[in-house]
Amino acid sequence: MKIGNYISGKWTDGLGEGSALYDSVNGEIIGHTTTEGLDFGEILHFGRTIGGQKLRKMTFQERGNMIKNLALYLTKRKEQFYEISYKTGATRVDSWIDIEGGFGNLFANASLRKLFPNQPFDVEGDPIDLSKGGRFMAHHILVPKTGVAIHINAFNFPIWGMLEKCAVNWMAGMPAVVKPATATSYLTEAVVKSIIESGILPEGALQLISGSANTILDHVESQDVVTFTGSAAVGQMLKSHKRIIQESVPFNLEADSLNCSVLGKDAVVGTPEFNLFISQARSEITVKCGQKCTAIRRLVVPANLVEDVQIALGKALDKVTIGDPRLKEVRMGSLVNHKQVEEVYERAREIGKTAELVYGNYDKAQTIGENTDKGAFIKPMLFVEHEPFKNTLVHETEAFGPVATIMPYDTTEDAVTIANMGKGSLVSSIVTNDDNIAREYVINAASHHGRILVLNRENAKQSTGHGSPLPLLVHGGPGRAGGGEEMGGVRGIKHFMQRCAVQGSPTTLTEITGIYQPNSKYKEAPQHPFKYYWDDIEAGMSLKTHKRTITDTDIINFANLTWDHFYAHTDVTSLQGSIFEKRTAHGYFILAAAAGLFVYPNKGPVVANYGLEDCRFLRPIYDNDTVYVRLTCKQKVDRDSRGEETPSGIVKWFVEVFDVKDELVAVATILTMVSKKSPFAEINAETIENHISKLTDSTVANWGMMSAQNMLEHLESSYRMASGEIQNFEIATPEEHLEIYRETIFNHNPMPLNHKHPLMNPDAPAELIHADLATAKNKLLEAIEQYEAFFKENPETRTKNSVFGMMNKYEWDLLNTKHLNHHFKQFELLD
């Protein structure tokens, strides 16, 4: 069997037999990989054009929801990947990190869509005024690069390694070409197959190369981005590729890393912190058989506790069962292959030139499970380097397996020095319950580590641990660790975008950015802005209010109402020497008064006040001063509807309060939740009669088994169910699923085609009730009239629906609108 390459929109086998891949546990052949005959230049071109064009046109919200849907799809199929992952030597726990950690990365990055504007590009930071008159300004935008992200990944995390990188480039609007490490590419292939089968990503957004890709960098261009995870030597060789240099291609390098964990001087034997240190060390040595770029390689321990740590950690490692990772009792699986076993032993012997081996040996590991004699198993190994300042091999040599070295220190300053002798790592940790020790270590060690975990009894239960990179935090490190920064939330996404400073007038930049810039020309709204649905509001849409004079009584009443009796508002005898001339209105009263001026009182698309941002009071307002407000749409932000709420978005309104001299008094940004337009045609008794008048006996449905009369009788029964006339049935939806089903009433998604109603025969249309089509039309109109009359007399009544449970009039109206739109489209009755 050949491990496939997914390129240019199809699965393609390379030429020739290729290289054999082996099961790490039993040594059996899994398949072969070959990339002979693949055109890497065409692969990259396909991604840039076909995939890139589609992704760049999508908004951040669309990209985020796409990634979220992909995460949901893969999570439902996760068990199939566990079975394949065992072949890499990973236990269930190891595989959980790779599989569900990878899918979790998709979820986390998808959620970042809420931090970006509802458009394909980002607007970064605050506007910058470049002139005294406010007519020339600048703003920074970030647009997707027009190239492709090329990810060259390591063997240890074939799923997480792909998805933690792809999640951010997809969010940025950039396609990916993934080149997993050959040894475990079969697991990456399995996930890519599932992704392609889902149809969720646009074609070209993801391509897979399973096997050697030695010449791929010959074809990179300036708009591409390359990421590499692996050894420092290979990474540095690739980073210095002439094409990378000629085209100035961004290159993110994550290399091997001599991460360390420090035991605080306070964490003596018997403290929770000592136990946490031992537990974490054992875990980091044995999880993934030590094959983690974030694993602890150096254990920095107070000199007086070295022996205690050695004994306690040895006892903990004694409890680790090695063998077939499919067995529940196994706690450590195998290395990826025998080549890696030899390399780990070679590096361990290098460390052992100056350090003392105090646990483990170079003998074959004793394993449990059938057919493990040919597996790539190895025992944990623990060294003690008694002179870490003198002997530097331990700070220069990484055995990429279950190998760690204990070393002593006297002062926290010494611990920092030892930690930093690794010349840069992905992560360090310190286990201490003394915050002064933690502060001294973190501040002085941070320059040499990409992430530092401070672990103690307070956060232990919630801590994700030393070796767990988190998608919203930077994953990378300086110096030896490569100098790269993967992920990191919004920062990670921006790595795949181009920053550009745009200069122009405020009005022009408003149109370019889609965000209102101060001093732009206003777009006077034809009607009050609060009358518009979210879809129809645009940046710059503005309203100038009428005026209001602030009285002495207003100020006193507001003070009494709020209990804010600050002297400037209540004691005019104390104003001498202050910045105030007279009794001064409260800043928050000015905002409240502004709301009174601009709020539209009637019920409409505005659902709720959602918050307040960037409030500034620029000068005092005294009694008898007169103010007015300019309300302008600053920005629209999309949001997901949750639970039983109709879809809505957020509108940020720029509020400017002026006095009668047109001088600015206060500014603020207020947020409102605004309903989105329904995509469904508005349907009432009058329009229903008009629509169904188009039906004849010869009208044929676009889908389904129903005749025109079947459809009318089906709608009639639904209305009679709503009005309580038909209730002799059971709710078909299980109680635990009702909430999820009910939420679908409120969203704007159309009903699915060919939905199987629980009260209908799925194999044949229902028998006709009425004599003819004309009678069915009249009976439907009669049922609708009775429905309206029933709820007019019984407005609080809830009636039973077979799918959605008990429903009130508002919920029935929402459902009926969807239901009628669904069936009227089925018979092409809507214009």
Image: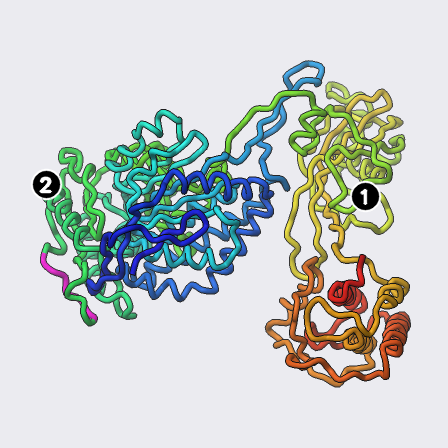
Mark 2 or mark 1, which is nearer the start of the sequence? 2
Relative vertical location of residue 400 with respect to residue 695 in this rendering, above or below: above
Neighbours of disc 1 within 10 Å: few (<14), some (14-19), many (20+):
many
Q: Which residues are magenta?
A: 363-369
Which residue is identified by label 1? 530
Q: Amino acid at mark 2?
A: Thr
Instruction: State whether residue 258 appears in this view.
Output: yes
Q: Is residue 252 left or right of residue 414?
A: right
Magenta stretch prevailing secondary structure = loop
Q: Tell me the quarter of the image containing the N terminus.
A: bottom left
Nearest the viewer among 522 and 820 is 820
Q: Is residue 423 left or right of residue 371?
A: right
Image depth: mark 1 or mark 2 in front: 1
308 in the magenta segment: no
Query: Which element carries disc 2, helix, strand or loop?
Result: loop
Q: Amino acid at mark 1?
A: Phe
Mark number for residue 354? Answer: 2
Residue occupying image coordinates x 66% and y 20%: 504
Mark 1 and mark 2 in contact? Answer it, CB < 8 Å: no
x then y, percent, for residue 490: 51, 40
Q: Tell me the quarter of the image containing the C terminus.
A: bottom right
Relative vertical location of residue 670 with respect to residue 623 in this rendering, above or below: below
Relative vertical location of residue 699 with respect to residue 759 in this rendering, above or below: above
